Image (spheres, helix red, strand yellow):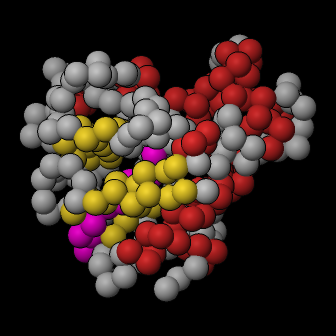
Amino acid sequence: MQSAAAVLGSGNPSCAPRSIAVCLALKEHAVTRTYAIPDLHGRCDLLNAAIERILDHSQGVAAKVVTLGDYIDRGSESRQVMERLVNWSSKALPLVALKGNHEAMMWECCKNVSEIGWWLKNGGDQTLLSYGECATELTAVPAAHLDWIAQLPSMYVDEHRIFVHAGVDADLPLDHQSDQILLWKRYPDASKKGHGRHHVVHGHDAKPDGPILTRGRTNLDTLAWKTGRLAIGVFEDGIPGGPSEILEINC
C-alpha cells in the first residue's frame, strides 16, 4: 500500500483553470470508483487519515479522489492542508480538487476584492495563524496557494453524478450555474432533488449527525473540523445513485 506521503508529492492540480468547470471523467485513467472527501476546514490529521483509509480500501481498484472544497479556516492546520493538496501527485490515485466558499473568500480578500473582516469572522484568522502570521497579514499566504485556488473548478461531472461544494439549482442547465449557487447554496432540509438524472454529491451544510443520504443527493459534511468525524463517500462510477459505502474517519 502506498503511504500518504507517496501520494502527496509535488505536482499540479488535475483540472484545467476556470471558475465554473464541468470536468469530464479523467480519460487517461480507467476509473471505476470515486472517493469524495467533504469539508476539512484545517484538519490535516483527518486528511492524512482519509488518504490512508482510501489507499487501503481501493486496493486492486482504479480510483480517484474528489475533494469538495473548504480546506481552510476554523481548524488550526489550514496551511498544512493546502500544502498537501497543492502538491498532490499520484497516477495511482488522481485528485480532482474543487473550490469551496472559504477558498473563494480567502482569494478575494488576499486580492483586495473583498473586505478582510468578512473572511476573518468566518475562520480566516485561524488560517492566517497557520501561516505563521497575525490575523491581518494577508501577505503571509503564498502566491502559489492563491494561484492554485484561482484554478480550481467549482463542479465535477461524471456519467451519473455532480460533485460540488454546496449544490446546484435543479432548474438551471449546468452551464448556467453561478458560483453563488455552486459555492453557497443551502438545500431545504426536505429537499431530495438531484439534477435531472444526476445524483448530487456535496458538503457545505454541516450536519453533525450526517451524512444525509436521499434519492437525489448526498450531503457528506458532518462538521468534521469540530466533531473529529469525517464521512468519505464511496461511489461506484458505473452505478447511478448514492454511495455504495461510507468510510468514517475519527480523529
Name the quadrant containing residue 25.
bottom left
Residue 114: image x %, image y %? 66, 16
**Is 169 left, or right, of 126 in this rendering?**
left
Residue 192 is a magenta residue:
no
Residue at the image point whose x is 43% and y is 51% from the top = 231
Locate the C terminus by quadrant. Answer: bottom right
Residue 35 is a magenta residue:
yes
Residue 58: image x %, image y %? 36, 75
Specify the segment rendered in magenta. 29-38
Residue at the image point whose x is 27% and y is 66% from the top = 33
Name the quadrant containing residue 239.
bottom left
- From where the camera sits, is residue 156 visible? yes
Residue 182: image x %, image y %? 37, 28
Residue at the image point whose x is 9% and y is 40% from the top = 197
- From where the camera sits, is residue 85 visible? no
**Is 17 left, or right, of 113 in this rendering?**
left
